[in-house]
Image: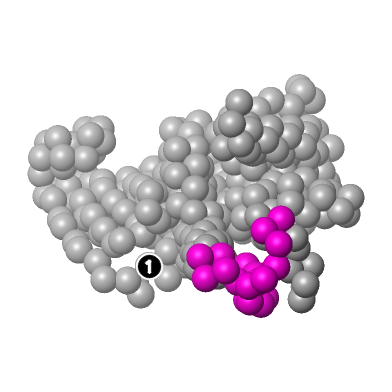
Amino acid sequence: MNAASTRWAALARAFGAALLVGAPLSILVAITIPFLTPAPTAWRASADPAHRESLTSWIGMSPGVVVVANENESARIISGFPFPCLEMPRSDVATRLTGSAPTNVRAADPGAVVHDWSAVLVNSALLGLPSLAAILLLTRRRSAAGPLLLAAAGAWLSLGVACAAAAFPHRLPSTDRAWSDPVEFSRVSNVRVGSAPAESTGFVATATHTIASDVVTFGHSIPTPQQGCPPLMRSRASYGWPLRCVSFRETDPSWRCPPTSPSQPLLSLASGSPSLLGFTTNTAAFAGLGYLPVLVLASLRRSRERRRLNHNCCRACAYDLAGVAGSAACPECGTPRA
């Protein structure tokens, strides 16, 4: 086995070890967050299929936690950092977190289940890579920690770019498109629209695309929604560069029904779903860009050493080796000639 294949095998083992360290760490963080996070201060109605498609379903968010309170089912706590990955319907935690929910919540005590395996893997990488790198640095294994630190920086940078694209959507040049025909919109976007309610005045769909985001809002327009009607406008958004790595699928905040108090939309990291392919590609891209200066400097150093050796000089200090035996080290700095 040559040196290159040995090096790649060592990198693969290091990344596998990072995932093994990050997986239990991400699960532990997801279990701990609901006990420490404050109760949501604002709730909003949801008619999204991911949230039980019910008028009595209400969603509240705290840092690292999404709480779904349903009048007819057990409250669900979806927690994790940075992405929600574990569902924990515990009665004691649910009672505390749903204390301000506008529904009568009945909580149960089933065991925790994985909510999103992609989120588990992404969280494992985001938490495991820097954790294992820190362990290697503490044990003075800097050469092994370097690639992990570079990969961790690439992973967190890809997440940061997606968050920046979501936080500042109007700072990038964009292209907009609108539809008034649900059939044409469904054909282009592969999204099932659903039938129009009797009180609707027409179909509205808009799409905004930038270099780092794709946002689509669609639904049937109702001039003045009545109390008790479901939200009809939906928004789907994906963020990231060069590939989209974080996606959201939520009800548009301007169509809350019945009205609720939140002033901010639910479109935040706590309700996002990561794309494993997007995160892997973006992490590799950013890590490769970070490693490019190292490759350039190493190439320049090797070129300089070859040039000095061709001129019979020391490859380290450029001392003239004329008259020095061929196998002897440099008399100036002691660097071997070979």
| Residue 98 image offset from top left, x and y in percent | 71, 46
Q: What residue is drawn where x is 38% and y is 49%?
A: 243
Please say whether residue 326 is one of the residues in the magenta stretch. yes
Relative to residue 244, is residue 77 drawn left or right?
Answer: right
For the view shown, which residue lies furthest in the top direction? Answer: 110
| Residue 74 image offset from top left, x and y in percent | 67, 29
Relative to residue 48, is residue 90 drawn left or right?
Answer: right
For this rendering, which residue is in front, 18 or 145? 145
Q: Is 112 rendered above or below residue 15? A: above
Most common secondary structure along the magenta stretch: loop
Displayed quadrant of residue 108: top right
| Residue 305 image offset from top left, x and y in percent | 56, 66
Q: Which residue is mark 1?
A: 169
Q: What residue is drawn where x is 32% and y is 71%?
A: 172
Displayed quadrant of residue 277: top left
What is the three-letter code of the residue carrying label 1? Pro
For the view shown, which residue lies furthest in the right direction? Answer: 139
Evaluate whether residue 303 shows in this view.
yes
Relative to residue 304, is residue 180 drawn left or right?
Answer: left
Q: Is 288 rendered above or below residue 319? A: above
Evaluate whether residue 100 shows in this view.
no
Please say whether residue 9 is one of the residues in the magenta stretch. no
| Span highlighted in magenta in the image | 309-327
Q: What residue is drawn where x is 42% and y is 64%?
A: 165
> Is the N terminus in the top left, top right, bottom left or bottom right quadrant?
top right
Find numbered disc 1 in the image and state the secondary structure of the residue it sits on. loop
Q: How is the image coloured?
A: one colour
For this rendering, which residue is in front, 242 or 312? 312
